Image (spheres, grey):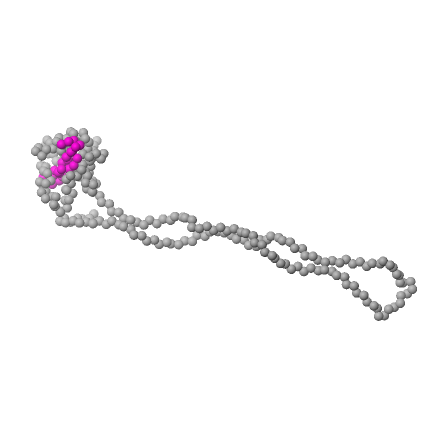
């Protein structure tokens, strides 16, 4: 269960094109969960037998000057696009309590226990605060997945976006119709037949005059015959009547409007060499 630096396990990993580009994380900045910079990654320690990652070697730089510490990979959230590693639950007090990692030191079981002893309280759960009974001969890193397992959810996520056309309607005023009325004056003519009475006096001379008996003829002075004369006069007046009714209403006409616009969509480009990639 010896741990060695990545370069010892994969001497050419920086130039490797076999799909292990994720190993090239040297000089990635390390931050705490509160976005406080801890330092930067200087190397990775891997299990010599299994090749699994175990620790990041972090140079704390000016945060805790001149100190290198080990960060279990299970506590690291790697963001490749940002070239950052976020250490889950890491505090300044923990770093101060961690033993200093020196290239000349022997990385043995006792040294790892010092490192694990600092991190265990931060990852402890009510059900399990430490692995089952073990010793230097029986301990396995797999016994503490919270420290050494890399959660698949912590992997890099690539979001593919596409644009869509969203159709909506807006009601806006396009015009106005005002309907009113005004008065026009014109001269109208009407024909009314009227009657007028006239007196016609006819005077005749009898051709066969018969003498009047004596005493029948009475001569009277001042005798008058009267007759009333009438005529019609037109009586013209005005009255208002409803000539026409106008009703105003609105109707709705529907039509379909076609619109075209260029939309973009992101597609996944996979460029790999050496090892096939199975899409899931």
Give the quarter of the image for residue 186. bottom right
Q: Answer with left or right where residue 147 lies relative to residue 246.
A: left
Give the quarter of the image for residue 33. top left
Residue at 24% over, 49% down: 266
Asked if residue 57 lies in the magenta stretch, the reply is: yes
Asked if residue 54 lies in the magenta stretch, the reply is: yes
What stretch of residues is rendered in magenta?
39-66
Q: Answer with left or right where residue 44 lies relative to residue 161.
A: left
Q: Closest to the observer: 118 or 203?
A: 203
Q: Is residue 152 visible?
A: no
Q: Answer with left or right where residue 255 lies relative to residue 133.
A: right
Is residue 196 depicted above or below 171 in this figure? Answer: below
Residue 191 location (% of width, % of height): 65, 60
Residue 5 location (% of width, % of height): 10, 38
Give the quarter of the image for residue 216. bottom right
Residue at 71% over, 60% down: 195
Residue 2 location (% of width, % of height): 9, 37
Is residue 132 depicted above or below 270 in this figure? Answer: above
Q: Answer with left or right where residue 187 lies relative to residue 222.
A: left
Residue 89 location (% of width, % of height): 20, 33
Residue at 20% over, 37% down: 86
Residue at 43% over, 52% down: 252
């Amino acid at each position: 269960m010896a741990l060695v630096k990545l370069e010892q396990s994969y001497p050419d990993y920086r130039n490797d094109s076999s799909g292990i580009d994720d190993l090239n994380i040297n000089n990635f900045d390390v931050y705490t969960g509160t976005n406080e910079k801890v330092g930067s990654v200087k190397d990775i320690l891997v299990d010599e037998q299994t090749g699994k990652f175990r620790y990041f070697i972090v140079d704390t730089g000016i945060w805790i000057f001149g100190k290198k510490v080990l960060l279990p990979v299970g506590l690291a959230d790697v963001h490749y696009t940002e070239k950052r590693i976020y250490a889950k639950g890491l505090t300044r007090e923990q770093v101060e309590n961690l033993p200093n990692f020196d290239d000349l030191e022997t990385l043995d079981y006792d040294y790892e226990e010092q490192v694990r002893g600092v991190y265990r309280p931060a990852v402890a759960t009510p059900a399990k605060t430490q692995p089952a009974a073990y010793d230097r001969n029986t301990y396995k890193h797999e016994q503490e997945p919270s420290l050494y397992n890399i959660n698949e959810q912590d992997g890099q996520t690539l979001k593919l976006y596409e644009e869509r056309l969203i159709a909506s309607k807006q009601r806006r005023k396009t015009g106005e119709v005002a309907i009113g009325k005004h008065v026009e004056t014109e001269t109208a003519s009407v024909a009314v037949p009227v009657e007028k009475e006239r007196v016609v006096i006819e005077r005749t001379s009898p051709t066969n005059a018969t003498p009047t008996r004596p005493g029948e003829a009475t001569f009277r002075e001042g005798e008058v015959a009267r007759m009333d004369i009438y005529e019609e006069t037109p009586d013209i007046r005005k009255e208002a009547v409803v000539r026409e009714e106008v009703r105003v209403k609105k109707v709705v006409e529907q039509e379909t409007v076609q619109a075209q616009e260029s939309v973009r969509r992101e597609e996944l480009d996979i460029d790999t060499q050496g090892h096939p990639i199975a899409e899931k």
